[in-house]
Amino acid sequence: MPARPPRRPGVRRLRKSPGREGPRMTLEARRARMRESLLGRASLTVLSWLYGAGVALRNGAYSAGLRRARHAGCRTVCIGNITTGGTGKTPAVLLAAQTLKKKGFKPAILSRGYGRKAGGRDVQALRDGRSPSWEEVGDEPWMMHRALKGLDIPILVSPDRVAAAETAVRFCGPDILLLDDGFGHRRLGRDADIVLLNALDPFGGGRLLPAGNLREPKSALARAALALVTHADQVQPERLAEIRAAIEAARPGLPVAESVHKAEGVYGLKDEVRHSLRWLKGRKVCALSAIGSPTSFEAELRKAGAEVVQAWRYPDHHPYTADEMRSIESVRAGLPLVTTFKDFPRLPKGWEALLSGEVLALGIRLEVVRGKAKWEEALCGEAVPVHEEPPEEEET
């Protein structure tokens, strides 16, 4: 029998461990399997109708005043989307918090804490000097807390957004609350909704979950104060014009801004050494991620000049295991392994001994490249910072 040819490097979409399907199947994998049969396709369509009916009933109840939103008592701005994952909400929330801080505001961030192991609806707080583990708060709040270290921007984590908002107002004294990923959460009132649309798939295939990736129909943009098109540099100008036209058709007059994700260096997770992007140029690397848009992460590596020989993609928020690290180690051939800061806290205990050589995280920030004034207006509205230090009186 002839020997089997070696497996070509490439992308591996993983559920549990390399080369095997685990018990937890991703939504995309389930849909792909259902689309193989007529019954499966029909089931997806029916489920989408039912899901859409539920969304319409919920939104209709709020619009008709049958259900009322509770306001926190200070300006609240939501940064969310109408599709599932991959739009860049976390970098957008970080940019919003940093922008408000520079303008003299005292922001606080509200997060649901997806992926956290601690259950319940208790409010967890991350502040300078208080850092719960990622298992208690979730990977995204933990990562944001590290990125905002020293800026005194509290992050309140709870699936009960109203309780988190009330806790923030009572104990942190913010003048603007940033609601992370809460566009469809109508229970907490807000003054402005900034909706992120990934230029690569702005409208989730045009169908509601589970047949498509839309959490809400395009008509939900009627509630938005701004549409922010992310990853705008990854499509042609003609495509951006089409997206703008689609936004205008869904919500005439809605302000639109555009942003790009920019890599800003790689950081050694073992030696804590920061390298410039030039370090990646011409290097062969492996990529590891469990995020909403792994293709965008890998595109940033290639843009920096790296050759991505192997890419492992796990479901969003996936907690890595020691067995998975051993499997990756067995095939990575000593090449540098690059991951994201969102993935870093989810590496298993003792990962340093399981992964040899260089293990790094790519730093990525969001930059608004078109419509910056519209972005800042949606954030601040007519609010005025009230936490500025009073000017010192001159001695007479």
Image: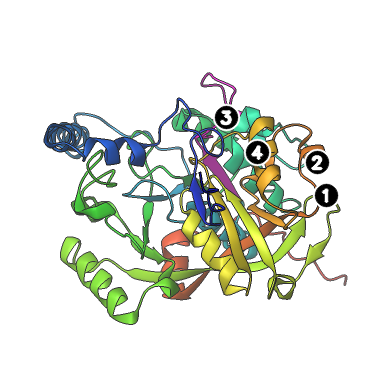
Label 3 or label 1, whichever lies nearer to me, is 1
Highlighted magenta segment, given as a residue range:
107-124
Label 4 or label 3, whichever lies nearer to me, is 4
Percent from the top left, x then y, of residue 355?
A: 76, 44
Mark 1 crowdedness (10 Å alpha carbons): few <14, some 14-19, many ≥20: few
Q: Amino acid at mark 2?
A: Glu
* C-alpha gap between disc 1 and disc 4: 20 Å
Q: Amino acid at mark 1?
A: Lys
Residue farthest along the bottom direction in this orientation? 237
Residue at image position (22%, 33%) is 58
Q: Earlier in the sequence, mark 2 or mark 4?
A: 4
Mark 4 crowdedness (10 Å alpha carbons): few <14, some 14-19, many ≥20: some
Percent from the top left, x then y, of residue 168?
A: 57, 36
> What is the chief secondary structure element of the magenta stretch?
loop
Residue indicated by mark 1 = 270
In the visual, does 388 lie left or right of 128?
Answer: left
Element type at mark 3? loop
In the visual, does 167 lie left or right of 387?
Answer: left
* C-alpha gap between disc 3 and disc 1: 24 Å
Residue 345 occupies quadrant: top right
Residue indicated by mark 3 = 116
* C-alpha gap between disc 3 and disc 2: 22 Å
Residue indicated by mark 2 = 352
In the visual, does 80 lie left or right of 207?
Answer: right
Residue 226 occupies quadrant: bottom left
User: In the rendering, which numbered label is found on residue 87?
Assistant: none
* C-alpha gap between disc 4 and disc 3: 25 Å
